Image: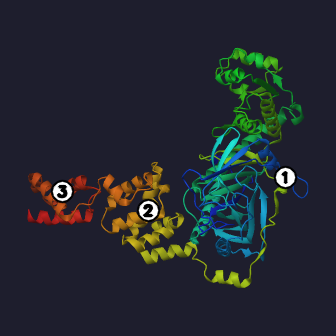
């Protein structure tokens, strides 16, 4: 499908919001360490959040939606990474100026105009990820632009905001959040919706990421960067996709969302052709519990044993549409099930497009259709749960079916790890932003901004040239470094380890990527641990060949040292004397073969020796000793 889509013709527009954690010494509104903790929490407290009206008396639909779920939140904390500010028991402290300086640096690198005064605002958030029920955010600069290939991409604004708490679990209506991440400074860079293809979306995200990394002031590793995408096409709707963590996934997410919207437009056209109107979908729910009284379907059996009901609704002329694929693995029925889960708190839905199956027989389907007066062209959706949950779930299904007639609904979706997306909540309204009264405005003087302007870091293009010049790297390696998140680390390692720049660059860009592809959790390795590995290599305590094995071992044993890795893997470097003995033994054991091979003897012996000592000896040294020994033979 991908190759046939003309993105220009369908009017694809994508806007990016890139959120990146800043590497500061403290959080945004207090002095706590901006780190995550792994141990058991020292403090826990329970809360329930409720939506409130804005100054205009409106309630944000997204906030009300979260409240509907009747959720309780258990917050977990430790004393190093959270204080009374995160617990919402104390007002925020003054804004972290270190974070402001980094945001201003990024703004000036993107040719944006800093604001005269920073005003902190509150943005309603009621999924429990902020103890306050809102997120603090402030605009730092406006109207920037970056060049990506031949295109100038407008940067609408650069903002600073606090990161949210991280979800650690969910049991029924109880959600657990750790507040260690809450308050870590996040920079947000928002582009205008001028991106017109999936490939371009990836390129723009990469260009922004490079500028952020060039400051040397951003956190690295999984979970430190998140991209949100706003995607629309002609005749579709604006969909916001939250939380794409992998840069490589961005083109795929755009591609899949376009597929989804095009397929929804097709379904809408078919329904309109069949002359179905949204008002034809009636809120008429049938109690069909008796139809399934003897069922062998485990899910329904379980519900009936708890005294719950089976409720059904008819969708006129929808037959065959619920199993229609919108994007890989996601059907219209999946979208209805997502809505039912959220609004109705149910486990899922059944629909006639996929039956008989799941222990539901053809006779039961027949009886069900009869019970709800369904014609051949009608689909039936049913749910087994409490009366209240089943009713709410079917209302949500009906709502989604009515939207299917109209076309593509405006909504916020969450990214899945495979590039597909799932329903998250309705699109937020305008009622979610209001001023933060606890923090006075901060004036930005021309003098302050000029100081930052005079010490701006080099731009990615300048750094590329310098890496090639200073470290004699070829263009391919230097470019890979700039595109990776390791350019800073590369320079630190070369300065501290006496290992050749090419070896370091190739390892950081190619080897690490290959190891990750093979399933090794190398992203868990701290930068200090990687530096330690290269220092050991420079000091001759381990060999170049042993690097991948040592790194994989360390990523699985985070609290261990390089020495532990070398010992555990049996990769202690052999001394020159030990090597000489091994080489002499191999030459004398294969004396006749060596003699017969004449000129090829060196390669032959080298192969045999390396097979035995790989990872424990430096290949150059092995070669040198073999040459000496062969001359004397």
Q: Residue furthest toward the bottom?
A: 447
The tag earlier along the polypeptide, 2 or 1, is: 1
Tell me the CA gap for discs 3 and 2.
36 Å
Percent position of residue 95, x then y: 71, 70
How many residues crowd mark 2 within 10 Å: few (<14), some (14–19), many (20+)? Answer: some
Q: The residue tagged with tag 1: helix, strand or loop?
A: loop
Percent position of residue 515, x then y: 44, 53
Q: Nearer the viewer, residue 256 or 246?
A: 246
Residue at 79% x, 35% y is 270
Percent position of residue 190, x then y: 71, 63
How many residues crowd mark 1 within 10 Å: few (<14), some (14–19), many (20+)? Answer: some
Tell me the CA gap for discs 2 and 1.
48 Å
Label 1 sits on residue: 52
Q: Nearer the viewer, residue 243 or 278?
A: 243
Q: Can the viewer see residue 8?
A: no
Label 3 sits on residue: 605
Q: Can the viewer see residue 202?
A: yes
Tell me the CA gap for discs 3 and 1.
79 Å
Q: Nearer the viewer, mark 3 or mark 2?
A: 2
Determine which quarter of the picture holds residue 430. Answer: bottom right
Q: The residue tagged with tag 3: helix, strand or loop?
A: helix
């Amino acid at each position: 499908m991908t190759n046939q889509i003309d993105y220009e013709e369908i009017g694809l527009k994508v806007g990016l919001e890139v959120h990146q954690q800043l590497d500061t010494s403290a959080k945004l509104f207090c002095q706590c360490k901006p780190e995550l903790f792994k141990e058991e929490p020292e403090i826990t407290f329970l809360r329930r959040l409720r939506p409130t009206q804005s100054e205009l008396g409106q309630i944000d639909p997204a906030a009300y939606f979260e409240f509907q779920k009747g959720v309780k939140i258990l917050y977990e904390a430790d004393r190093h990474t959270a204080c009374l500010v995160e617990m919402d028991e104390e007002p925020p402290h003054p804004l972290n100026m270190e974070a402001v300086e980094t945001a201003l640096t990024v703004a000036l690198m993107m040719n944006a105009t800093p604001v005269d005064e920073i005003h902190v605002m509150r943005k309603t958030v009621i999924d429990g990820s902020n103890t306050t029920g809102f997120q603090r955010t402030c605009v730092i600069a406006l109207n920037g632009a970056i060049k990506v290939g031949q295109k100038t991409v407008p940067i609408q604004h650069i903002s600073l905001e606090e990161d949210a708490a991280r979800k650690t679990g969910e049991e029924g209506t109880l959600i657990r959040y750790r507040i260690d991440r809450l308050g870590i400074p996040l920079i947000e860079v928002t582009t205008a919706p001028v991106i017109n293809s999936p490939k371009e979306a990836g390129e723009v995200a990469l260009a922004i990421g490079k500028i952020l990394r060039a400051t040397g002031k951003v956190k690295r590793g999984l979970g430190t960067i998140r991209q949100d995408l706003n995607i629309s096409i002609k005749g579709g709707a604006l969909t916001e996709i939250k939380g794409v963590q992998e840069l490589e996934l961005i083109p795929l997410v755009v591609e899949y969302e376009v597929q989804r919207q095009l397929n929804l437009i097709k379904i809408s056209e078919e329904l309109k052709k069949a002359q179905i109107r949204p008002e034809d979908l009636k809120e008429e729910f049938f109690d069909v519990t008796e139809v399934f009284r003897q069922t062998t379907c485990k899910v329904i059996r379980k519900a009936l044993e708890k005294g719950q009901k089976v409720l059904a609704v008819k969708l006129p002329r929808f037959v065959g549409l619920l199993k229609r694929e919108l994007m890989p693995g996601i059907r219209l029925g999946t979208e209805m099930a997502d809505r039912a889960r959220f609004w109705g708190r149910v486990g899922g839905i059944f629909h006639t497009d996929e039956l008989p199956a799941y222990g539901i027989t053809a006779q039961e389907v027949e009886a069900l259709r009869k019970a709800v007066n369904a014609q051949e062209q009608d689909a039936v959706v049913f749910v087994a749960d409490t009366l209240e949950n089943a009713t709410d779930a079917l209302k949500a299904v009906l709502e989604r079916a009515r939207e299917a007639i109209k076309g593509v609904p405006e909504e916020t979706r969450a990214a899945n790890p495979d590039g597909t997306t799932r329903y998250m909540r309705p699109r937020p309204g305008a009622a979610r932003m209001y001023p933060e009264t606890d923090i006075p405005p901060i004036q930005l003087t021309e003098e302050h901004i000029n100081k930052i302007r005079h010490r701006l870091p080099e731009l990615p293009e300048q750094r590329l040239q310098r890496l090639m010049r200073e470290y004699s790297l070829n263009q391919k390696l230097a470019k890979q470094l700039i595109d990776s998140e390791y350019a800073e680390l590369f320079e630190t390692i070369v300065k501290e380890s006496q290992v050749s720049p090419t070896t370091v660059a190739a390892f950081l860009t190619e080897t690490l990527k290959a190891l990750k592809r093979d399933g090794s959790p190398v992203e868990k390795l701290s930068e200090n641990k990687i530096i330690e590995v290269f220092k050991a290599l420079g000091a001759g305590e381990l060999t170049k060949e042993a690097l991948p094995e040592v790194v994989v071992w360390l990523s699985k044993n985070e609290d261990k040292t390089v020495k532990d890795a070398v010992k555990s893997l049996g990769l202690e470097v052999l001394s020159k004397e030990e090597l000489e003995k091994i080489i002499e033994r191999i030459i004398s054991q294969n004396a006749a073969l060596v003699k017969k091979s004449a000129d090829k003897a060196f390669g032959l012996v080298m192969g045999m020796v390396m097979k035995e000592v790989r990872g424990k000896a430096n290949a150059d040294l092995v070669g040198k000793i073999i040459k000496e020994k062969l001359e004397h033979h």
